[in-house]
Image (cartoon, helix red, strand yellow):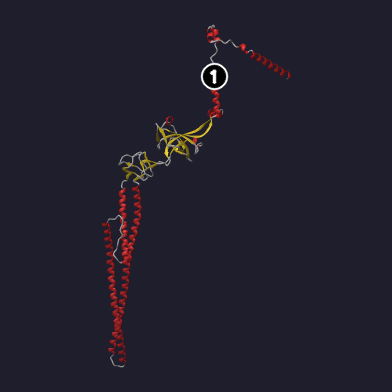
Amino acid sequence: MKIGLEALAALCRRYGEVFVTAWRHRAQFEPVRRANDEREFLPAHLELIETPVSPLPMWTIRLLILIAVLTVAWAAVGRMDIVAVSTGRIVSGGRTKMIQPAQGAVVSAIKVRDGQHVAAGELLLELDAVGADADHRKTGDALRTAYLDASRFEGLLRAADSGTSPRLAAVDGVEPSRLAAEVSLAEGQWRAYQSRRDALSAVLAQREAELATLQQQIRKLQGSALMAQEREKDYRDLLAKNFVSRHAYLEKQQQHAELQSEIAVQQSRVKEVRATLASQRQELASLRAEFRKDALDQLRQANERIAQLQEEIRKTGAQQSRMRLVSPVAGTVQQLAIHTVGGVVTEAQPLMAIVPDGDALEAETWIDNQDIGFVRPGQSVVVKVDSFPYTRYGYLEGTVESVSSDAVRDESRGWGFTARIRLKRDRLVIDGKPVKLTPGMTVSAEIRTGTRRVISYFLGPLQEYASESFRER
């Protein structure tokens, strides 16, 4: 072992001495440097040997090696953005308001044009539903009739309580001639009631007079009967003393009995008359009660009709108001779909859109399932408008404002998610002039979801292939 180490040390010293000697005499081994004109007079083979090799290929190789080394170093150290690309369109931050009819109708007037600015509540379209106006007028006329009926029966009830002629309250929207006809009808009903009441009152008065006559006759008969009783008593005493004949006494007794019988008959008639009077008074009270009951029943029915017709008038009024389409907000008319007066529109047909004023524009984009796990609110976004090539006119910057929490289905793209991106500005400079973007323009959004090393971009596929290889059956 020791001998081997000594031999290795001796070998190293020997090579070191040789290298030092060669380095000291290196100038002697270099060829004679000749100028270009000297090499031109040498023989051809010597000229070829003496001419040095061009340094360009060597420097090219060195430069390529340096670039490769720098590239690998940059790829290992440098980082690049990871973006999720999504497509969508520009929308209003306050949501564009779609104008749709509630039912099928005919266009009677178009009050706006595409691109026109409208105020909140401004009339946009007038529609005409078949029969809607006629139904509203018919219901309104029936409602006024019900109000007139209620007013007439209320007047009859007041007249029944006060005993005076009925007075009707005025009804809004009713012509004076119609109100006068209703007053005449009420007065006719009141006169018919008075006629029956007066007839019963006359019969009642007649019975009361008859009762008074009977009572007077009874009092007269009672006086005569009292005197006849005294005469009968006197004749009975005289008969006992044989001062008068028995026949004379019996005559007085018969007179007294006849008077008592007449009194009983008259008292029976008094009872009959009193019973008749009670019946007449009950009939008169029943007449008044029946009159009030009929009036109250008719008033209740009129009020029920009023309540029902008021609901109907609200429905028809709402239907009529829906025939006048107004702007829900101040904004600009877009996507006007009708241009013909007399044209027919269907229920829920989009007629136009109102883009609200003052609302910041947003981009609504579609996020694929493969990217949704990395998209979060607050991430920065580069938005490129398809209408204006970004290489010439630039792009917009924005921020992810919200991401849908549940997937939605698109017929062409399948299941995915939607994201809303708040734009930092709503204009692009086109040929030196700022042009405002409008809702509906399609865009492509690049959402910055993170960063990674550049070299991982190239090594990722290799790692994927390596991890998936050698496992097939």
Circle 1 sits on which residue?
A: 61
Quadrant housing the N terminus: top right
**Residue at screen point 52% across, 33% down:** 451
Q: Nearer the viewer, residue 256 or 340?
A: 340
- In the figure, is residue 454 to the left or right of 21? left
Residue 303 visible from this viewpoint: yes
Residue 261, above or below 452: below
Residue plotted at (32% across, 68% down): 285
Q: Residues within 10 Å of mark 1 (few under 14, many from 20)?
A: few
Report the quarter where the C terminus lies: top right
**Is label 1 in a helix, a strand or a loop?**
helix
Where residue 411 appears, as percent x and y from the top left, is 43, 36
Q: Is residue 11 left or right of residue 471?
A: right
x, y percent for residue 194:
28, 66
Q: Is residue 108 above or below residue 45?
A: below
Picture coordinates of residue 37 (x, y %)?
A: 52, 9
Give the camera-side residue of 319 and 230.
319
